[in-house]
Amino acid sequence: MKSKIQLSALQLLIISFLSSTTWSACSIRPITHAELSDSSVDIIYTLGHNQHRFTAESHSGKFVARTFLDKKLLDENAVDSLNYYDFVHKASNFMGDRRRVASVNNAESLASCRAPYTVVIRLSGDAKTYQGCRSIDDGNLSRLVRDGEFLLYSKK
């Protein structure tokens, strides 16, 4: 009976340790409302021979999304603040997920990449950048771009 109780305590200790280390390794620092008040998300990617760019930004209480093709502005719209905040959180989660699997994307694979992309998130002056390759990204960038285009074309 004594060994059963000790085993249960040991199991509890191991489970407690594993759950705390897993949580801290996977958690992404929450973005505050103050950081979002002056922020932007910039996605630049190559598709074929064209350079595409999507930007969403918040400045002085105005929320705007833009899309470019080869540095030419295609569309620009004011966007809803709640949808903008949701998109910034999705972009932040995307960047956190990509950084966790960055060991797979070594410098050699990025150097030989034919479809590179860059995601930049600016939160109150602090910029975080991630560079990747669409061909080894399992469609994650495409989903983020789709969410950005939905933001751009959704009604305010």
Image (tube, helix red, strand yellow):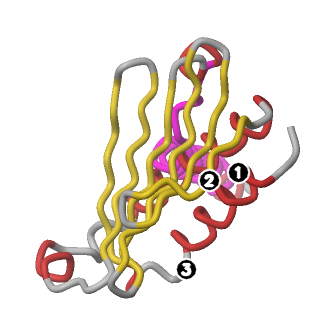
In this rendered view, identify the residue nearer to me: 37 or 61: 61
Q: Answer with mark 2 or mark 3, whichever residue precedes in sequence.
A: 2
Q: Residue at x 55, y 33 (%)?
A: 57
Instruction: Examine the rendered structure and indicate whether residue 95 appears above or below residue 34.
Output: below
Name the quarter where the C terminus is drawn: top right
Mark 2 near mark 1, Cβ–Cβ under 8 Å?
Answer: yes
Q: CA distance from mark 3 to mark 1?
A: 20 Å
Q: Which mark is residue 152?
A: 1
**Which residue is located at x 88 percent, y 45 percent?**
155
Seen in the image, is 83 located left or right of residue 10?
A: right
Q: Amino acid at mark 3?
A: Gly
- From the viewer's perspective, tell me whether residue 73 is left or right of residue 147: left
User: Looking at the picture, which amino acid does disc 1 mark?
Assistant: Leu
What residue appears at the point 33 percent right and 81 percent down from the top-left corner?
115
Q: Check disc 1 and report its element: helix, strand or loop.
A: helix
- Mark 2 and mark 3 residues within 8 Å of each other at the beta carbon: no
Residue 6 appears in view = no
Residue 91 x %, y %: 55, 49
| Nearer mark to the viewer, of 3 and 1 | 1
Residue 139 sits above or below residue 93 on the image: below
Does any portion of residue 42 appear in the rendered image? yes
Quarter holding residue 143: bottom right
Q: Which residue is mark 2?
A: 75
